[in-house]
Image (spheres, grey):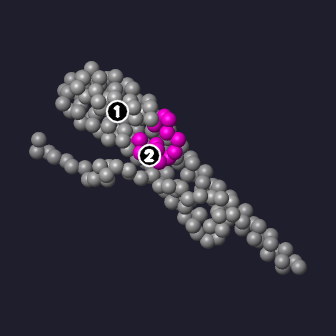
Amino acid sequence: MIIAIVIIIAIIILVIAAYNSLVQARNKVKNSWSQIDVQLQRRFDLIPNLVETVKGYMKHEEETLTKVTELRTSWAKAKTINEKSNLDNQLSDALKTIMAVSENYPDLKANQGFMQLQQELKETENKISYSRQFYNDSVTIYNTKIESIPTNIVASLFGFKVEELYKAESEEAKQNVKVNFSE
């Protein structure tokens, strides 16, 4: 009888430990997504200033500026990680276009406000990149716990679900960057 009670207590302790481990991992995933979200919001907050600074110089680039504004609005309405990830990738492409086009405007490149915004966006992009990596690390740890014995049993009992990794959606984002110093 005592052995049965000890075994039951041991099983209960293992289930509690596995459950708490899964909760910690899930919360780390949520926190790491929140960090991406914070950095993306920072980037989106910088965009109106960038657009206003660039507008005067880039009248014929109105389509790119409009797209950036539309993406910013769409991102605010997005609900899922996949939606936000997709919009983030599209926005990154649009911002690259703005920075590339700015090369054609020496006055814009020399504009102090533009240079400061460009630096802030660069720092934010680095933070976003780090946050994406941290998110994927957290998701990998969490998903491994969900799929590993014995925590997979507890995960299925309590409804823990596998999370998706943050991925580059566009084929362009997966391509090597081409650098040409001959121009």
Q: Write the residue at 55% across / 61% down.
A: 143
| 113 vs 50, nearest the viewer | 50
Which x, y percent locates residue 18?
67, 64
Single out the residue that lies furthest toward the top: 56
Three-letter amino acid code of the residue under disc 2: Ser
- Residue 90's disc number: none
Q: How far apart are marks 2 and 1 (CA)?
A: 16 Å
For the residue labelled by badge 1, is the local secondary structure a helix, a strand or a loop? helix
| The N terminus sits in image quarter | bottom right
Question: Is residue 49 covered in magenta?
Answer: no
Image-quadrant location for residue 13: bottom right
Three-letter amino acid code of the residue under disc 1: Lys
Q: In this view, does 13 lie to the left or right of 126?
A: right
Which x, y percent locates residue 121?
37, 35
Which x, y percent locates residue 104?
18, 30
- Residue 67's disc number: 1
Q: Give the range drawn in magenta.
A: 75-88
Single out the residue that lies furthest toward the left: 182
Whether residue 147 is situated above or below residue 71 in the rendered picture: below
Q: Write the residue at 38% across / 30% down.
A: 69
Q: In this view, does 33 lie to the left or right of 68?
A: right
Which x, y percent locates residue 108?
24, 25
Binning the other alpha carbons within 10 Å of mark 1 as few (below 14), some (14 to 19) or many (20 upward) gives some
Residue designated by label 2: 85
Q: Write the residue at 58% across / 51% down.
A: 28
Q: Is residue 80 left or right of residue 67?
A: right
- Asked if residue 50 shows in the view, the reply is yes
Q: Is the magenta stretch mostly helix, strand or loop?
A: helix
Q: Write the residue at 10% across / 45% down.
A: 182
